[in-house]
Image (cartoon, coloured by chain):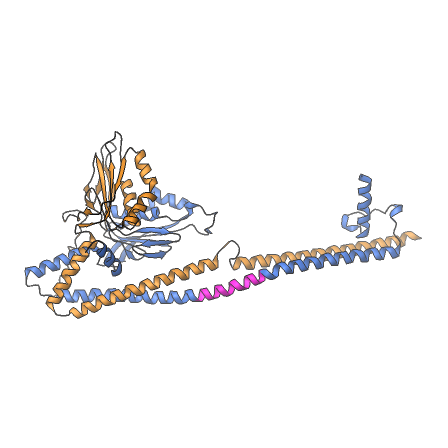
Amino acid sequence: MKKPKMRRKNSWRRKAGKAISLLLCFILGLLLALQMKNVADLKSLNLLGNDSVESLQEQVRSLSVANNELRARNASLNANLEELVRLGNDDNAQINFYRQQTESLSVFAGLTPVKGPGLIIDINLTQPGANISASNLLVIKNALNGAGANAISINDQRVVATTDIANTGSDTHPNIIMNGTGITSDSHYEIRVIGEERKLKDFVDFHTPIWDHLKQAGCMVSFSFPEEVEIPALAKDSPAFRQQLLEPVPTP
Amino acid sequence: MKAKFLKFRRKLSYRIGEGLLGEDRPLPEETTVLPSKDKWSLALTGLILVLILGLTVFTAQQRLSPRHRLTQIPQEEINRLTEEKDKLRDENARLRDDNLRLASAINEAREENLSLLDLSTEENQALLQAYRDVSYQAGFWTYEGPGIRVSLQDKEGIRYDKNTLVTEIVHDADVHYYVDFLKAHEALAIQVNGERLAPTSPLLCVGSSILVNRVYHATPFVIEAGIDDAEALAQNLLNSRTYQAMVSRGLRVTIEYVENIKIEPQDDLIYVEEQVKRLGG
């Protein structure tokens, strides 16, 4: 008599158990979905493993700096334009203006010898087997530019805007050319630099890997910081001295 | 021990409805539960489950609430910064237009003045020639003609954190490689991100910016050069081992030949003035 009753009870319990487990699964799934949505939201805001706020702040900062710089640059151009307009037909004023412009642009372009406080790097190659390549000199020149050098020369060749330094010759007879002119030396390379002493001292201290590399190649490197370093101008007959030879012919 | 475990398992199976543990066997004699006790047991189980659920929901709410606040605050900050950035970008575009307009006006005024200059004397003729020569050497002229454009960008999708590899970022040396290559092939005019290169122009990468002359420019780094035989040189660059190595590092490098590229003249008179002053000019 008891058996059917027990079976009914067991069936009811099974149903209840299934319902509870279903409910549990549902709630668990809901929580999981909520958590995933939360993570997705955070990802979209770049708060997880990203720095959107920081990146935006950086963009705003750099745009502000760029705009301030452009404003200053435009003000300077405006002043220059006003001066040109003011010169007008006054021949004397024009001649004075172009004379002064020629002088300052000549200094800027490296067409005038200059002197000032700086650094002399002497790379001695007298040890047997010592060698240096154009890429070594390029690395030094580029690092000096980054260190704020105002004028540079290597073995009396002035660095200008279009200066190239390259290897030529063969493996047995390597040559280095700069400004289209041979600067190869068996004994030493002298790099003359004009710039702020503090910056140049930092440059020497900071670039020890370059000096170590040269020492490994058998070179002896020495530095001096004279109060006056003379740097020659780019020679007018240098292949790097480029002139605008094509002049437009005025139409009659 | 094993018998005890089996007994406990069966009791549990019975309490939560057997089906859950896949057991459908009748209970042993000693675990027979009376109907009234059965109800109490089920109610107790239900209560415990409700309590556990309540606790879970409460804990989740406690954890989600501050995170929700965390998402709200940066969102407001992001909106504010985006708005500010858009304004600055518009202003930047306007200032750049002004800059180009002024540079072009200066060129016109200069040419006009020079055309009015009395060239009847040899002295004036020599001065004009000297002025043209130094202007050319100093980069105060516009190049228009065949050229090459190289664009360099860091690997896509990097997070700039401790997992970022050094090789995935563009460095000074990468920019120098192209600039030096172009100089070695007698480029007539070079600019990096719109800045005309001068004799001692620094090219210094600082984070995602590059310092050219005296101004930091954001990535991508674009090197443009006016050069003869640009088409063949662009192909040489594409075939170079250095280019292949950069690509295999994941850097985004594009090299293109441009039939008619325009390199603007040096327009940063502040930089020019600073350099001249430092050299005693």
Point out the residue furthest to the left here.
B121
- Residue closest to the eye, B255 or B182: B182
In the image, A210 versus B133, the foreground residue is A210
Apparent side of residue A97 relative to residue B40 in the rendered image (left or right) = left
Q: Quadrant of the C terminus of chain A?
A: bottom left
Q: Position of residue B57 (x, y in %)?
A: 68, 59
Of B56 and B24, the residue lying toward us = B56
Q: Is residue B36 magenta?
A: no
Q: Is residue B234 visible?
A: no
Could you tell me residue B60's position as x and y percent? 65, 58
Q: Which residue reaches farthest front?
A: A227
Magenta stretch encompasses residue B73: yes
Q: Main secondary structure of the magenta part?
A: helix
Give the image quarter of residue B90. Answer: bottom left
Q: Is residue A89 above or below residue A107?
A: below
| Furthest residue toward right | A1
Position in image of residue A239 (x %, y %): 17, 47
> Could you say which chain is coloured blue in the image?
B
Residue for point 46% across, 47% down: B164
Q: How many marks?
A: 0
Instruction: Give the x, y percent position of residue A202.
Output: 32, 46
Question: Is A45 on the left or on the right of B151, as rendered?
Answer: right
Task: Read off the magenta span.
Answer: B67-83
Drawing shade for chain A: orange
